[in-house]
Image (cartoon, rainbow, N blue to C red):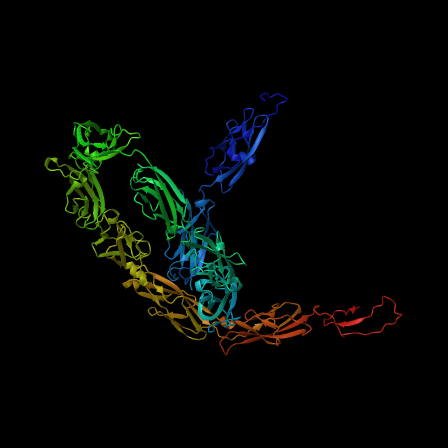
């Protein structure tokens, strides 16, 4: 209703039309503030003007809406990483009613965040003997962006020679052996870059790597033997068993590392190096020939040094693991399909010549299955056996009579099905029957009747007889024969058509009775009869004087030209012998011929000029008919051949006026380059195509076959000598003199390059001088190799082979520069020294196949010396151990790898030390003590030694020499206190801590290391003491009723030299407290008593029971 004030009308609310109310609206986070993000569209049934808006505090913070147009504007910048989606409620109003709807706004990601490192600062401490390939640290950085913008790739800037970082995981790995004395710390810069291809962002972080300076009993296995059985289908990670070994050196036991030495076929087991847990790490299959006999594993346990690396102390043991079979294999046939041909006469029970074998590789009941056939017509055959365990040969026999004519071939499915599971084997069987001749032909009628006029033309098909044979193939093919061959009739032995062979004459023979035979391909035959009735007719027609006529004329003749005269006679009397002549047919140009009668003859003439080239083979074949006046009229025909004589009126023409050919330069001599072809519209052999002769001009490198037009090479070509040939070919026809005509074409042959020339070095040999420690990209020398080939084949690419970390080469120009890896003339690494002085350059072209220079060239580099090495102490860290009270001497060794004076070294002790009890020989480096040393006064000396070379600008090194005064074992271990009183309940579990003993020894080192033993009061082994920690524990559960108290004697023995070890003793008194852990026990097996009959009801007789527990009242029992 359009009347807003009609009380009977109800307002229809507006509705939104935008798709995103039912889906979502995508806005990218980098959209500028003030941009239009969408336009609200709505419709109102009454056509009222609409007002648009947005509601909600958060929505109004980010968006504003033009109330008239519905355009939504962005008011505040979006950030997907802060908020990836929001629900915004928009409304539309027609003044009377407000409609609200919510839009799911998805914030699209852009790459606006650089990766962020976590866990900084990065500091790593590793020993200098960390092996190459060991991962030492993992850098962690994330990028809150999505997709490639949030995928982080790590790298070092600049790259490090000693460490690599895994680009994806951030794992830092050692790539070269480390040396604390050369470099004690590395400061690496890690670059984390996201993978956005348009605007990648990156961030740097510092990684500080600090390099730290770096028994007589083998271990023994426990809980032997380890042989076990496991099921073959155990999951990956399944623990087979725990391998445990201990160090027999009880004084200082070391940790054990476990490895598998042999027998771990295909690495199907994993042995945890630390825990000794042997787990399954590969798929097990008992049916695998490699696994069926089980595994014989040899495991090695290795003692670990304090740095957790293996020592030389090892022990090995060998044990077996057998796999228990699971039903995890389906039965399987020895072929996916079986094919056989058998005769259709095969009897029931006949065994088909098929080798069918079914096998289930499982064991026992797991290998039992049933075999059966299914599919169309499978009931014609049976199987035996049908129940199989493991493996069996299956025989297939005929179950029902077969008939080739009923079913020629069989195809069905062969199944092997386990009854205990869903395992199924499958194969297809295809059986083709061999046809046998087991049916005779049968005529469709016993007697065939036919009537025909006497003038029936010989060759006329008169009657089709039909006999059928139920056999198939050659046995079902029927052929037909007359019993006695008649003169007037013939019989098509394949089709059964009876054909009139000679003319009939009603006056001589009015009826024929013929006997026919139907014989199949196997020799079976049947007899039938044919009755032929002859009808009388008027049977004389026209007869031409000749059987055929021939005429000729030249092409292009302008006037009417007669080509032949014909005449026919008819033995009938008028009007039947009145003849008319017509051209019944013509092989071509039928409208060009006419017939007129001249002196009783029919003269055939050509009325228009003929073109020999348009006449097939130059011949026109006419058929002229003579028709008599009888009713019905009889006629006869005669053939006339008209020969058109050719004139040479067309020149040869090539298929192209110019041929363009491209061939490779390595084409063989005699190879075909091109086959040119010219055509001549003259159709005769004299002037036409067959008469053409070809010739070639332009180069002796090519030959042209004068008849076929084939152009071939006469010699090997070389593009580098000549790259293009222009040849002229001619074709002439068979005309003579002025009548001969010629065609001409050009052949442009371009020789294509192949990569048949390798680069060749120029200006060898190469020598260069480079100052050691040269910075990155210092020019060394340029090498040059040339390749005469063209394009990519002649473009030379240079590379350093084998790779040389000290130098780089420009692959295009051959310029060699330093790589930035330090060139140290004094390097002790023979491999590095050789690489610094010898650069082997390889040159290859870009052709396919790629050719390499006949030999690499070598650049010999002479490294010029700098005084860049400080004197180096060789036997550091140097610690001299001197027993207290003795004089001693030690040598300090120093070297300087620099050349000449730069390598001469002088040593001295630093002056101003607080106590100078030593003397150092400045030349030999021998250090001697100048007084008696006393560990109790000074146990450790730190002497500062200076070494300096004799260079123009001397370089120095300093080092600390430590003199350690060794202790003698003169102190006795002392317990504090010496007596321990402990009370504990008898219910405490095994391994319960009874007491922690405190004992000390004032000696140092091994002399102060203590070992604890229980030497008394522990005859039944109820307690143990920690060998190193002195903690007394229970070994088994205690029983107060067996023993209520223990007095343990514990000794602490130091680890001094044998023969001088000292011992301390402590006493531990243990009182066991009672718990209620014993049932009452009757003192007798049975009790008898007497009761007076006057005893009141409710009186209880009393029995006495005994319990071993104390402080518990005895209970009376009814």
Q: Nearer the viewer, residue 525 or 402?
A: 525
Above/below status of 724 relative to 126: above
Query: x, y (%) of residue 325?
Result: 51, 63
Q: Nearer the viewer, residue 362 or 27?
A: 362
Asked whether residue 975 is in view, the answer is yes
Above/below status of 314 relative to 856: below
Q: Is residue 41 left or right of residue 891?
A: right
> How many dots with numbers?
0
Q: Nearer the viewer, residue 91 or 313?
A: 91
Query: x, y (%) of residue 926?
Result: 36, 71
Asked whether residue 300 is in view, the answer is no
Q: Determine the image quadrant of residue 890.
A: bottom left
Q: Nearer the viewer, residue 367 or 510?
A: 510
Quadrant of image for the C terminus: bottom right
Q: Is residue 859 left or right of residue 535?
A: left
Which residue lies most toward the front here? Answer: 507
Query: x, y (%) of residue 977?
Result: 61, 71
Which residue lies most toward the bottom here? Answer: 1059
Q: Determine the image quadrant of residue 873.
A: bottom left
Quadrant of image for the N terminus: top right
Query: x, y (%) of residue 326?
Result: 52, 62
């Amino acid at each position: 209703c359009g009347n807003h004030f009609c009380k009977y009308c109800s307002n229809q609310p507006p509705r939104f039309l935008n798709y995103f109310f039912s889906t979502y609206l995508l806005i990218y986070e980098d959209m500028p503030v003030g941009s239009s993000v969408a336009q609200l569209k709505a419709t109102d049934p009454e056509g009222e003007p609409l007002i648009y808006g947005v509601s909600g505090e958060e929505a109004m913070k980010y968006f504003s809406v033009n109330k008239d147009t519905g355009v939504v504007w962005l008011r505040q910048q979006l950030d997907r990483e802060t908020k990836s989606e929001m629900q915004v409620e928009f409304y539309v109003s027609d003044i009377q009613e407000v409609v609200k709807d919510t839009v799911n706004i998805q914030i699209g990601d852009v790459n606006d965040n650089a990766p962020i490192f976590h866990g900084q600062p990065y500091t790593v401490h590793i020993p200098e003997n960390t092996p190459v390939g060991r991962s030492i640290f993992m850098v962690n950085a994330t990028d809150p962006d999505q997709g490639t913008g949030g995928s982080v790739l790590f790298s070092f800037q600049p790259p490090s020679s000693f460490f690599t970082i895994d680009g994806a995981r951030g794992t830092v790995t050692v790539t070269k052996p480390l040396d604390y004395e050369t470099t004690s710390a590395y400061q690496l810069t890690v670059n984390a870059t996201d993978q956005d291809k348009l605007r990648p962002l990156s961030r740097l972080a510092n990684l500080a790597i600090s390099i730290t300076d770096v028994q007589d009993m083998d271990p023994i296995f426990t809980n032997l033997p380890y042989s076990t059985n496991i099921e073959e289908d155990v999951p990956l990670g399944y623990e087979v068993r725990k391998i445990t070994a201990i160090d027999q050196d009880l004084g200082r036991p070391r940790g054990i590392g476990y490895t598998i030495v042999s027998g771990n076929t295909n690495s199907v087991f994993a042995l945890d190096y630390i825990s000794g847990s042997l787990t399954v790490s590969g798929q097990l299959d008992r049916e695998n020939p490699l696994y069926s006999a089980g595994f014989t594993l040899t495991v090695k346990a290795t003692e670990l040094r304090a740095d957790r690396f293996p020592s030389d102390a090892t022990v090995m043991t060998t044990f077996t693991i057998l796999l228990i079979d699971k039903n995890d294999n389906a039965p399987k046939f020895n072929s996916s399909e079986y094919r056989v041909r058998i005769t259709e006469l095969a009897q029931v029970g006949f065994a088909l010549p098929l080798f069918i074998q079914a096998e289930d590789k499982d064991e026992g009941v797991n290998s039992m299955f049933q075999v059966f056939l299914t599919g169309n017509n499978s009931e014609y055959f049976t199987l035996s056996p049908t129940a199989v365990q493991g493996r069996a040969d299956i025989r297939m026999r005929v179950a029902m009579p077969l008939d080739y004519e009923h079913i020629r071939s069989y195809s069905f499915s062969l199944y092997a099905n386990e009854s205990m599971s869903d395992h199924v084997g499958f194969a297809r069987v295809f059986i083709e029957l061999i046809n046998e001749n087991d049916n005779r032909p049968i005529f469709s009628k016993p007697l065939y009747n036919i009537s025909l006029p006497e003038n029936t033309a010989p060759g006329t098909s008169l009657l089709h007889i039909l006999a059928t044979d139920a056999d198939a193939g050659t046995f079902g093919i029927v052929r037909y024969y007359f019993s006695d061959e008649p003169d007037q009739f013939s019989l098509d032995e394949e089709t059964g058509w009876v054909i009139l062979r000679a003319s009939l004459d009603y006056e001589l023979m009015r009826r024929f009775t013929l006997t026919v035979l139907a014989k199949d391909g196997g020799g079976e035959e049947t007899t039938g009869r044919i009755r032929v009735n002859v009808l009388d007719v008027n049977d004389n027609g026209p007869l031409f004087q000749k059987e055929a006529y021939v005429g000729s004329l030249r092409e292009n003749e302008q006037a009417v030209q007669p080509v032949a005269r014909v005449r026919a006679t008819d033995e009938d009397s008028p009007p039947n012998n009145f003849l008319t002549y017509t051209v019944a047919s013509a092989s071509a140009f039928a409208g060009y011929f006419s017939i007129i009668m001249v002196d009783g003859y029919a003269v055939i003439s050509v009325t228009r000029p003929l073109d020999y080239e348009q006449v097939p083979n130059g011949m026109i074949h006419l058929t002229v008919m003579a028709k008599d006046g009888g009713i019905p009229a009889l006629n006869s025909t005669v053939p006339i051949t008209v020969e058109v004589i050719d004139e040479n009126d067309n020149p040869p023409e090539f298929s192209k006026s110019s041929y363009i050919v491209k061939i490779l330069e390595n084409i063989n001599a005699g190879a075909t380059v091109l086959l040119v072809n010219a055509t001549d519209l003259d159709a005769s052999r004299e002037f036409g195509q067959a008469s053409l002769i070809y010739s070639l001009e332009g180069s002796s490198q090519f030959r042209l076959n004068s008849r076929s037009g084939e152009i071939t090479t006469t010699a090997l070509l070389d593009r580098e000598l000549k790259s293009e040939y222009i040849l002229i070919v001619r074709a002439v026809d068979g005309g003579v003199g002025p009548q001969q005509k010629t065609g001409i074409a050009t052949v442009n042959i371009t020789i294509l390059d192949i990569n048949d020339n390798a680069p060749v070095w120029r200006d060898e040999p190469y020598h260069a001088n480079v100052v050691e420690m040269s910075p990155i990209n210092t020019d060394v020398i340029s090498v040059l190799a040339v390749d005469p080939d063209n394009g990519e084949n002649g473009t030379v690419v240079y590379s350093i082979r084998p790779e040389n970390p000290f130098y780089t080469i420009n692959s295009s120009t051959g310029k060699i520069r330093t790589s930035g890896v330090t060139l140290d003339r004094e390097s002790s690494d023979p491999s590095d020294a050789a690489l610094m002085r010898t650069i082997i350059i390889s040159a290859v072209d870009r052709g396919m196949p790629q050719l390499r220079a006949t030999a690499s060239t070598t650049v010999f580099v002479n490294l010029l010396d700098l005084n860049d090495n400080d004197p180096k102490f060789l036997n550091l860290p140097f610690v001299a151990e001197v027993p207290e009270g003795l004089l001693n001497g030690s040598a300090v060794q120093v070297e300087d790898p620099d050349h000449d004076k730069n390598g001469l070294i002088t040593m001295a002790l630093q002056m101003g030390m607080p106590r100078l009890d030593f003397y150092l020989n400045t030349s030999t480096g021998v250090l001697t003590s100048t007084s008696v040393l006393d560990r109790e006064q000074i146990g450790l000396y730190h002497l500062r030694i200076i070494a300096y070379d004799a260079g123009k600008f001397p370089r120095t090194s300093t080092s600390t020499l430590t003199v350690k005064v060794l202790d003698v074992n003169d102190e006795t271990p002392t317990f504090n206190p010496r007596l321990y009183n402990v009370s504990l309940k008898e219910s405490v579990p095994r391994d319960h801590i009874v007491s922690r003993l405190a004992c000390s020894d004032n000696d140092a080192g091994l002399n102060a290391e203590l070992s604890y033993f229980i030497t008394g009061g522990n005859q039944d082994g109820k307690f143990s003491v920690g060998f190193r920690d002195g903690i007394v524990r229970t070994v088994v559960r205690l029983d107060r009723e067996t023993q209520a108290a223990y007095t343990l004697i514990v000794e602490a023995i130091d680890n001094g030299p044998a023969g001088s070890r000292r011992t301390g003793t402590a006493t531990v008194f243990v009182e066991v407290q009672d718990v209620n852990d014993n049932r009452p026990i009757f003192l007798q097996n049975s009790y008898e008593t007497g009761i007076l009959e006057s005893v009141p009801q409710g009186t209880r007789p009393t029995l006495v029971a005994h319990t071993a527990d104390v402080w518990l009242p005895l209970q009376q029992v009814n």
